[in-house]
Image (spheres, rainbow, N blue to C red):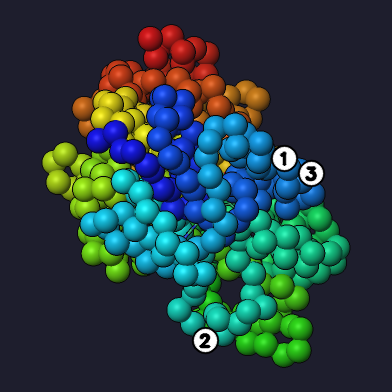
Amino acid sequence: MNPASVLVIGGGLAGYNTARELRARGYAGALSIVDPAPLPYDRPPLSKEYLLGRRGVADIELSPAAWFSEQGITLVTGSVVALDAATGTVVLENGQTLNADAVVLATGGSARRLPIPGARDPALFELRTMADADRLRVALAPGIRLAIIGAGLIGAEVASAALELGATVVLIDPIDPPLVPALGPELATRLHLMHADRGIEVLTGLPVEITAEGPVRTVHLESGRSIEADAVLVGVGIVPNTALAETAGLETDNGIIIDPHGRTSAPRVFAVGDVARIRAADGHLERRAEHWENARNAGAVTAAALLGQNPASPGAPWFWSDRHGVHVEGVGDMAAPGTSVVRSNPDGSQVVFRLAADGTMAGAASIDGGLAIRAARRIIDRRIVVAADLLADPAVDLRKLAR
Ligand SMILES: Cc1cc2nc3c(=O)[nH]c(=O)nc-3n(C[C@H](O)[C@H](O)[C@H](O)COP(=O)(O)OP(=O)(O)OC[C@H]3O[C@@H](n4cnc5c(N)ncnc54)[C@H](O)[C@@H]3O)c2cc1C
């Protein structure tokens, strides 16, 4: 395509990395990023080191302001409210109009709201932005009672951080254990049990209402049980920010539909990151990836496609998470049909491999097993068939199996 100008809507990791990769690939045209935040920042620390006060604002900037000037990338602070997909013209909430040959939608997702009475109470907490993290950090004084609805990746990370900050934590989820599709039942169970071991009250139940009395919030469960808290965090996933794409007439379906190179149904519009959903070559719609590495890789793929280059496939999707002093990683698809093989190492680290019927590996997940996941990723990407007994044996070097 090689457009004379590119406008990126959304300055999260996916939008930032699209711009970064465009310049790295020699793109010399006009390049702008529009986002409500003045400088692009990284989100994973918001539920970890930033929430704990161990990293500050400057530590989580994706690049310092000077880098954007050096690269000739214009940062526009604002929110886009309308897009004309045919002309590449966008309108900001202040009435400003911008135009570009190509537009990249990198609008990410917003925290999902619970569909129950009381869920729109502005005193409830969610965690998606730096401002959300700042607000939560102020609330997490020692001794505060924090109820967390949703024990997925973010709920679990905040539970761990809040405990470290001295809060009394109740963690509520309707599913026991959560995260089986991401990690498999073996690791999901072990990780979920860690919460109670560390002193968190873990409740399996479905919230049906949240009521308020003065500063206290009460979460009512379907079972009749109610939990009083000084702060309630709702961490039940995200909804993709597709409104702009929808009103611009782009194809959407729980995400903006793209081809594997980021092209939407409109020729001059691309989409990338959490908001995008790939239609594979065989026509099936893939699950949206809501992980950091996907946002980074997809930015590179889209930049290449914008320049008419042939981008390399990033391979099996990967994510990580940290809680209670352990490091969790997953690669590929742990929910794929097949069988699981567990490798338990003498140091307490553990890896579970998901094998398809034809002996290839579909996914792997680990607790404190990053090197094993790296090897598993090569095994998945190269479609190497490895015997289950070798995978299970901690004495066998996985790197050799990945060659
Ligand atoms: C607290 C937290 C912890 C996480 N931890 C991990 C982790 O440990 N491991 C992992 O793999 N992943 C983690 N993630 C997920 C990872 O951060 C996301 O997958 C990644 O940020 C997605 O990047 P994105 O650019 O697609 O979307 P986002 O980061 O959501 O960025 C989208 C941007 O678009 C802007 N925007 C939206 N609409 C408009 C508009 N109309 N006009 C202008 N701008 C707009 C938004 O303000 C936002 O800045 C975490 C996410 C969060 C929130």
> Which part of the image, by quadrant, shows the C terminus?
top left
Pointer 1 or 2: first along the chain: 1
Question: Which residue is depicted at the point 36% across and 21% down?
Answer: 379
The dot on residue 59 is 1
Q: Residue furthest right?
A: 142
* Marks 2/3: CA–CA distance: 36 Å
Mark 2 vs 3: CB contact within 8 A: no
Neighbour class for label 2 at 10 Å: few (<14), some, many (≥20)? Answer: few
Question: Which residue is depicted at the point 76% across and 89% down?
Answer: 214
Q: Position of residue 146 (x, y in %)?
A: 72, 68
> Which part of the image, by quadrant, shows the N terminus?
top left
Q: Position of residue 48 (x, y in %)?
A: 68, 47
SS at circle 2: loop
Q: Is residue 144 left or right of residue 228?
A: right
Q: Position of residue 343 (x, y in %)?
A: 49, 27
SS at circle 1: helix
Mark 1 vs 3: CB contact within 8 A: no
Pointer 2 or 3: first along the chain: 3
SS at circle 3: loop
The dot on residue 172 is none
Residue highlighted by disc 2: 117
Residue 270 or residue 285, whichever sits in front: 270
Question: Which residue is depicted at the point 54% across and 53% down?
Answer: 76
* Marks 1/3: CA–CA distance: 9 Å
Under mark 2, the amino acid is: Pro
Q: Which one is closest to the eye, mark 1 or mark 2? A: 1
The dot on residue 54 is 3
Under mark 3, the amino acid is: Arg
**Image quadrant assignment for residue 280:** top left
Q: Can see residue 226? A: no
Mark 1 vs 2: CB contact within 8 A: no
